[in-house]
């Protein structure tokens, strides 16, 4: 008997998994780091490698203060393709050999510095992108419940909410430059007089 070819038609992806969890997030476009944060503040250095044609990424996180790395192999996807505020995420932590082995896959890279920022009692992760996306700054807030997520208003330091704009998902951003993003900001009307498009 030959080996069966796996296809979307004969491969089952369970609706629920004890290994996966729901991640509830809102994502915002910023002009720059919010007032009270500077580039010199404590941050993590993140490199995401999105494996081409899949929902998988390898995330390497370095803490510059300790020079220690954490590497995660992640699957992340939105069950509802029109709602990116609720995603299913599964993480596996890798050692150095495992990370090196998986590095052989063709992948698109994103590099960013992540800052922790508290505003009106809510903690945000603020990402300042590097490389081809330098100039892009996004903030994310996470929520424990759907009610919290649904009732949360855009913070005053944000230009626009971009949670359900596929362009601002990691799988899309890794194929773009900041010029592409700036063009979309202007075209979509997200730009204000103080926007990232200025």
Image (cartoon, helix red, strand yellow):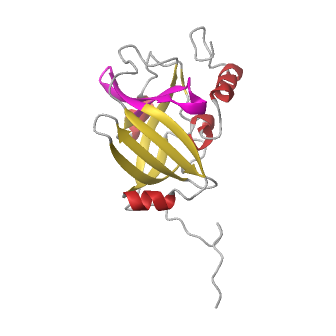
Q: In which quarter of the image is the N terminus?
A: bottom right
The tally of labels here is: 0
Which residue appears at 40% of the width and 21% of the height?
39
Residue 118 drawn at (x, y percent): 32, 23
Compared with residue 114, is residue 7 higher up or lower down, i.e. above or below?
below
Residue 53 drawn at (x, y percent): 64, 55
Which residue appears at 53% of the width and 65% of the height?
13
In which image quadrant can residue 194 be found? Answer: top right
Q: Residue furthest top?
A: 193
* Most frequent secondary structure within the magenta stretch: strand
Compared with residue 159, is residue 70 higher up or lower down, i.e. above or below?
below
Q: Does the magenta stretch include residue 86?
A: no
Q: Which residue lies furthest to the bottom in this view?
A: 1
Residue in front for this viewpoint, 152 or 2:
2
Residue 40 drawn at (x, y percent): 36, 21
In which image quadrant can residue 126 be found? Answer: top left
Residue 160 drawn at (x, y percent): 54, 22
Which residue appears at 35% of the width and 25% of the height?
117
In which image quadrant can residue 63 be found? Answer: top left
Q: Does the magenta stretch include residue 126?
A: yes
User: In the displayed structure, does residue 95 sit left or right of residue 14?
Assistant: left
Q: Quadrant of the C terminus?
A: top right
Which residue appears at 67% of the width and 25% of the height?
179
The range drawn in magenta is 114-141
User: In the displayed structure, does residue 10 sit left or right of residue 130?
Assistant: right
């Amino acid at each position: 008997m030959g080996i069966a070819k796996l296809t979307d038609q004969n491969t089952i992806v369970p609706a629920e998994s004890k290994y996966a969890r729901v991640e509830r997030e809102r994502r915002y476009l910023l002009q720059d780091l919010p007032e009270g944060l500077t580039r010199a503040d404590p941050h993590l250095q993140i490199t995401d490698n999105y494996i081409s044609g899949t929902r998988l990424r390898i995330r390497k996180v370095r803490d510059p203060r300790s020079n220690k790395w954490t590497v995660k192999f992640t699957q992340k996807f939105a069950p509802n393709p029109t709602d990116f505020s609720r995603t299913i995420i599964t993480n596996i932590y890798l050692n150095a050999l495992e990370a090196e082995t998986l590095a052989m896959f063709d992948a698109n890279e994103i590099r960013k510095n992540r800052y922790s920022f508290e505003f009106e009692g809510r903690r945000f992760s603020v990402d300042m992108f590097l490389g081809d996306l330098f100039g892009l700054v996004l903030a994310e807030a996470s929520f424990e419940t759907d009610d919290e997520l649904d009732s949360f208003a855009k913070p005053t330091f944000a230009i626009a909410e971009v949670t359900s704009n596929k362009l601002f998902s990691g799988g899309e951003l890794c194929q773009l430059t900041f010029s592409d993003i700036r063009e979309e900001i202007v075209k979509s009307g997200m730009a204000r007089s103080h926007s990232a498009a200025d």
